[in-house]
Image (cartoon, helix red, strand yellow):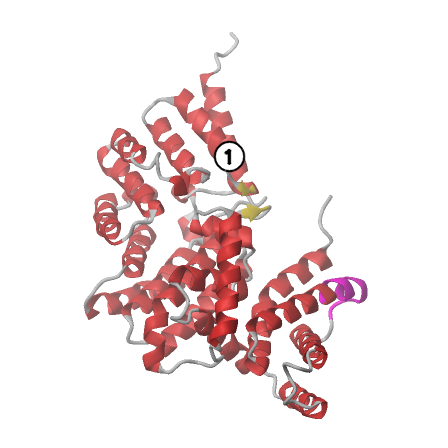
Amino acid sequence: MRADPLNVQIERLLQELTPQVLGSVVRRFRDFAAAEDAVQEAALAAAGQWSRDGLPENPRAWLTQVAFRRMVDQIRSDAARRLRESEAALEAAYQKEWAALDTAAQEDDTLALLFMCCHPSLTPASAIALTLRAVGGLTTAEIAHAFLVPEATMAQRISRAKQNIKNSGIPFEMPTAEERVPRLRSVLHTLYLIFNEGYTSSNGPDLRRGDLSYEAMRLTRMAHHLQAEDAEVAGLYALMLLTDARRPARTGPEGELIPLTQQDRTLWNRGQIAEGIALLSEALPRGSVGPYQLQAAIAAVHDEAASADETDWPQILALYDMLRRMSDNPMVRLNHAIAAAMVHGPNKGLELLDTLQTDVRLTNHHRLDAARAHLLERAGNHQAAIIHYRAAAGKTANLPERNYLLTQAARLSSEQRPSNG
């Protein structure tokens, strides 16, 4: 049964607007945990009322008004904590804030919320996890998937981060240029993970979540305007542009996954590719090269190849060699193994994948099995490839990815089956 179009529209609209509304509520009331509860209640109310009565004329204003009223009600019920504030002052502040709402303020609020959640008093892992929840709107399960840790572990991490913000009295405001520096790496990593979840969703019926990837690109563009001299900010934005440029060719008419080697490259967004390469070309000569610039350079090599066969794999392998020395991320090592296989043959890639077998962060991740299946197929071991394609399919909750992996297994099985006659 197909989902109701209005309910689908409402769900996507709430995913887009919730972080923006949360920014406004936190800016006004300066209580992150209470503001998050109020916005979640407003979103629940919206889901029920909008599906029944239709969308309001201004959905963001509707959500903000309901969330503000929830906060006012909460403050009223906690007289001991808010003794200094009279009911009249609260209502006046509410009315003033309500009158001042506009799109520019909402955008500033979202970026300020991003920097607030990445405050240096929090550990980087906790800051990034909290920001993914508050700004990215990701579920705890999706964040755990991004960090390659159990969901229960991530839930505890987010809970502690919220408590630390409450106890520390971290102000909700855009930090100065000097204050942004110690937060910037966490901000960039958060935006990177939000984009990745949007580009290839960890679960669901669609390959991607456009709302997340778009929001990550929008906020990264804003961060680039704030920190125009930072080469890694430019590198991350270039990476997003160069990667998102392939979006029109990644899926077929039925939403099925089309791998990079089979994509129609005439559908790639050449404007985004040109913009990304220009950003990267300007950033690279500035001095120290970071991981986002290297990943953007890898994306640029792919995007500049006229066909899959013309891809400069030796250059990609050299870039992954540099990236591997900077990062302990097992996904970097996995991609390095694939690049090595493209240069030195599948057996070299399989040898490198063997070193990842004991990495607990990949135990339940489908990409290790998927990469192994692909290299086994290239090495001619089709029976083993079938096993790993099926194992990979069983580990992903993204339906187009699962269907693609099962299709590969079925194709190899069909090729092995003896013909009749």
State which quadrant residue 176 falls in. Answer: bottom left
Tag 1's secondary structure?
Answer: helix
Residue 53 magenta-highlighted: yes
Specify the amino acid type for callout 1: Ala
Q: Which residue is mark 1?
A: 393
Q: Residue at x 39, y 63 (%)?
A: 123
Quarter occupied by residue 230 = bottom left
> How many marks on residues?
1
Q: Is residue 342 left or right of residue 11?
A: left
113 vs 381, nearest the viewer: 113
Q: Is residue 18 left or right of residue 411?
A: right
Q: In the rendered image, which quarter contains the N terminus? A: top right
| Region of the chain picked out in magenta, as a range | 46-55
Relative height, residue 7 to residue 2 (above, below): below
Residue 348, image x, y percentages: 25, 32
Does residue 239 belong to the magenta stretch?
Answer: no
Name above or below for residue 369 compared with residue 298. Answer: above
| Residue 74: % across, % down | 69, 76
**In the orientation shown, which residue stands out farthest toward the front?**
80
